[in-house]
Image: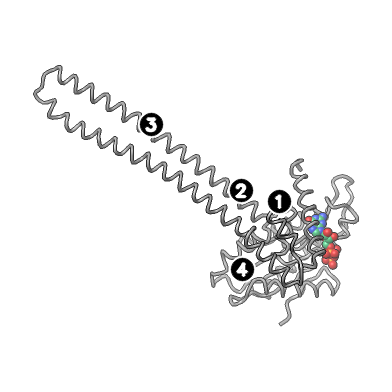
């Protein structure tokens, strides 16, 4: 693992812990929006953002309303304004390129006009006059050559610029939608991926799972937070390997994951949940520094069914309730939503 990766890993863990502690202090629920705002608060907040958050106070409804406003303005708003900046810059490059192309076209028209005019002049004139006309045409040809070279340069600059903007845009989206610790989707990424498929009727019903690592706190307490972070990474990788490419996996909170299986009945969702549970519980993880095996990693999973008339957040809530029952029933097990 590179030094940079280790540092990122440590920083993300610290931010996540600080965010969760802040939510607890504020008596705020660990919902997707609250967690995202809390994470941003400890990651890289602007002064305005910090001021509004510092004023979060009063009854819970007021606090939630402020959090919602901050989320729309500073998190979703930032994404939108970044996207429109990219599109303005691409328009600018395209505009400049068009101007160069149209200038070159004008020059080409002049050139072909000169050629047409030269033809009758050349017929039946003296040798001297012919030489002058040919010299003039050579001059014009050189100019056209220079223009076409500058057009070529401008086009290759524009291609380079657009490629660079695309890369910047992709990197920005990666930062906005990926969890830096596990490289799977974060909550914003989950919502984005879900939005892309949610209007397609053929994707329903979907099975939605909430999976949580059992007694995760004790990994941190026994082995330290870096090992705890590694456990989260290993579980994320294991889940990702087991699901289909069209399924959606996201880190929902500290040691919580959401998995959405499109076109999947509750019965089949339960079968997949059971296979994920088994796969994780069979992992044998060794510490690199001491070669000691970690204690068994297990998951509790709640499964709910999402129909096309349902809201994702309500379905996640039902999966969360089922997860709670799985925890109470002893952990390392799956439970389905109540009918
Ligand atoms: N290392 C590490 N710890 C985290 C991260 N996010 C959350 N945690 C910790 O995860 C622990 C979660 O503990 P609890 O919610 O009490 O649950 P638990 O110990 O998993 O027990 P059950 O869920 O009831 O089985 C807390 O101690 C958090 O500080 C993270 O990104 N990295």
* Rendered location of residue 187, percent (x, y): 68, 61
Question: Which tag, 1 or 4, sits closer to the chain's start?
Answer: 1
Q: Which residue is mark 2?
A: 171
The image quadrant where one finds the N terminus is: top right
* Rendered location of residue 141, percent (x, y): 28, 27
- Name the element at disc 2: helix
Question: Which tag, 1 or 2, sits closer to the chain's start?
Answer: 1
Question: Which tag, 3 or 4, sits closer to the chain's start?
Answer: 3
View extreme (bottom): residue: 339
Ligand 1 is within 8 Å of the C-beta of the residue at disc 3: no
Structural distance between the alpha carbons of marks 1 and 4: 34 Å
Q: Which residue is mark 3?
A: 149
Q: Which residue is mark 4?
A: 262
Viewer-side label of 3, 4: 3
Structural distance between the alpha carbons of marks 2 and 4: 27 Å
View extreme (left): residue: 124
């Amino acid at each position: 693992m590179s030094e940079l990766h280790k540092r990122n890993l440590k920083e993300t863990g610290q931010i996540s812990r600080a965010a969760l502690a802040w939510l607890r202090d504020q008596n705020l629920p660990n919902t997707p929006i609250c967690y995202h705002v809390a994470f941003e608060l400890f990651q890289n907040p602007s002064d305005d953002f910090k001021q509004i958050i510092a004023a979060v106070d009063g009854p819970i409804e007021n606090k939630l309303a402020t959090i919602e406003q901050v989320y729309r303005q500073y998190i979703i708003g930032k994404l939108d304004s970044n996207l429109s900046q990219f599109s303005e810059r691409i328009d600018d490059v395209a505009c400049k390129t068009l101007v160069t192309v149209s200038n070159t076209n004008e020059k080409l028209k002049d050139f072909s006009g000169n050629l047409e005019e030269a033809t009758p002049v050349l017929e039946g004139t003296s040798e001297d006059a012919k030489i002058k006309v040919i010299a003039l045409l050579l001059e014009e040809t050189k100019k056209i050559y220079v223009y076409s070279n500058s057009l070529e340069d401008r086009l290759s600059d524009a291609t380079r610029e657009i490629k660079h903007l695309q890369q910047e845009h992709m990197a920005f989206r990666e930062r906005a939608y990926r969890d830096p610790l596990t490289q799977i989707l974060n909550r914003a990424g989950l919502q984005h991926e879900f939005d892309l498929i949610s209007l397609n009727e053929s994707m329903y019903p979907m099975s939605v799972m909430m999976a949580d690592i059992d007694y995760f706190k004790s990994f941190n307490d026994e082995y330290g937070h870096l090992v705890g972070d590694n456990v989260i990474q290993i579980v994320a990788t294991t889940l990702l390997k087991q699901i289909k490419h069209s399924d959606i996996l996201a880190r929902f909170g500290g040691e919580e994951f959401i998995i959405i299986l499109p076109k999947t009945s509750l019965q089949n969702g339960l079968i997949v949940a059971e296979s994920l549970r088994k796969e994780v519980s069979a992992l044998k993880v060794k510490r690199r520094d001491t070669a000691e095996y970690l204690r068994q990693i297990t998951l509790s999973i709640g499964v709910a069914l999402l129909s096309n008339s349902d809201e994702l957040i309500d379905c996640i809530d039902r999966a969360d309730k089922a997860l709670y029952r799985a925890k109470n029933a002893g952990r390392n097990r799956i439970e389905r939503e109540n009918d």
